[in-house]
Every structure is written in structure tokens, then in C-alpha cells.
Image (cartoon, rainbow, N blue to C red):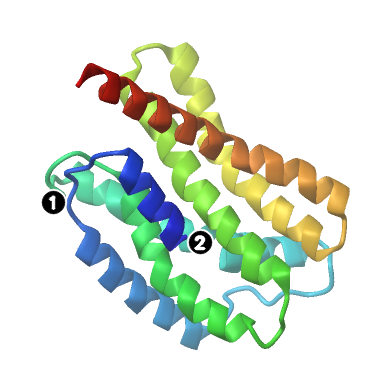
Amino acid sequence: MPMFYLFRRSTEESNSSGGIWALLLGSIIALIQFFLGDLISPGGFGISRWVSGLVDIVVLPVMIPLFLYFFLVLFKIVMGTADFTNFTLLWLIPGAGIRAVSWSSANDPVLLVLVPVLWTAMAVGIPLFIRFIMVSYKWSIKIPSILAILCLPFMAATAWWAFYSQKFGLGTVFLILTLLPMAVSMIISLLKTQTEGNNI
């Protein structure tokens, strides 16, 4: 996650603020979540396990900074260009470190590798659709973008649940679907950087 943040900063110039607040608040919330434990007790491999992953492991850590940053932008507390991705990635770095320590005893690649990948995919993918909504005047773009924002967390949770349940075929399908918006965002950033470089 820190490597992807540095990669993104190397391809995009951003004058957004809030980085220090993201690291500070992300650390505080991560510690609170660590000491409180899971909000939903998982059980077995069924729907309760999926809901637990949706809330406690995969989605909630990403949606908290996204919603908070939305209100900071809405009330103009954040100055400069709104950058949901950088704020969310910085927020997640302390939490990823704290959870890596607690998860390392299980030595489970689904938690140690897959979950940070899913976090990164949502932190990059959801702001991509937010950008589409903000810059487009066409409802033919706005409506699919809204649906994509709603669907992406559920696809990420399903990918985690499938790999956790050793349903690797299903997990691969949902992982690819979750990663697609991030791939599109990266391609757009690289093309934009290349175009700006050619114009210099």
C-alpha cells in the first residue's frame, strides 16, 4: 500500500491537503478497532462469515476515510484539489501495519496479502467513479458510476470470502472484477502523465 501510494504520487501531481490528518486519524481509528475487536462475530464459512468480512475486514476500513473525506470536501475544510485516493491510502497505512502484526500469527496470505490488495483496489476504484460523477453531466455515466460504487465493496467482500472458503475460481473472478477500476485509473493516470510530458 505505501508502495502504491508512492507510485501514484509519481504519476500524478496533487495539491490536495489532509495527508497529516489522514495518517493521524487513521492511526487512532486503527487502534480503536484493534482494541474493540470485530463488530460482527464470524461463524463458519457461510453468510455470517461474509458479513463479518464485509464489515470488519474488507469494507469498513476503507469506507470510513472515504466518507470522512467526502464531508471534509463538502464543507470545504480540505483545501486544494479533492483527492479521495491519496487521503484513503494514507489513512489505511497505519491500520495495515497494526493489522499485519495481529494477523501475522495466523500466517494467512488471504489476510496478509489479499486484504491490503482489496483495500487498495477500493481506495483507487471508488474515487474513480466519484470523479466520473463529478465531471460528467450525462446520466448515462452518472448512474452506472453510482451503481459501481455500490457494487465494488460487495465484490471485494465476496472475493475475500471466496478465497477464505477456498473457492478459488469464484474468488479469482471477483478479485479481477474488483481490480478492474484500479487498473483503469492507473491507465488514465499514466496516459495523462505521458501526454503532459509530451507537451513540455
If the image is split into quadrants, where does the C terminus sit? Answer: top left
Question: Callout 1, which amino acid?
Answer: Ile
Q: Do the residues labelled 1 and 2 touch (CB within 8 Å)?
A: no
- Left or right: 18 in relation to 136: left
> Is residue 133 among what the camera can see?
no
Residue 25: percent from left, percent from top: 29, 70
Res. 70 in view: yes
Say which element carries label 2: helix
Against 99, residue 196 (above or below) is above
Say above or below: 141 vs 192.
Answer: above
Q: Please state the horizontal and vertical placement of residue 160, each as a whole percent of the image.
A: 71, 58
Task: Determine which residue is flagged by label 1.
Answer: 77
Residue in view at x 67 percent, y 45 percent: 155
Q: Mark 2 points at which residue?
A: 60
Is residue 176 toward the left or the right of residue 94 in the image? right
Give the class, few, some or many, for how many residues have Cα within 10 Å of label 1's Cα (few <14, many ≥20): few
Q: Quadrant of residue 118?
A: bottom right
Q: Nearer the viewer, residue 53 or 11?
A: 11
In-image side of 133 versus 176 (left or right): left
Q: Earlier in the sequence, mark 1 or mark 2?
A: 2
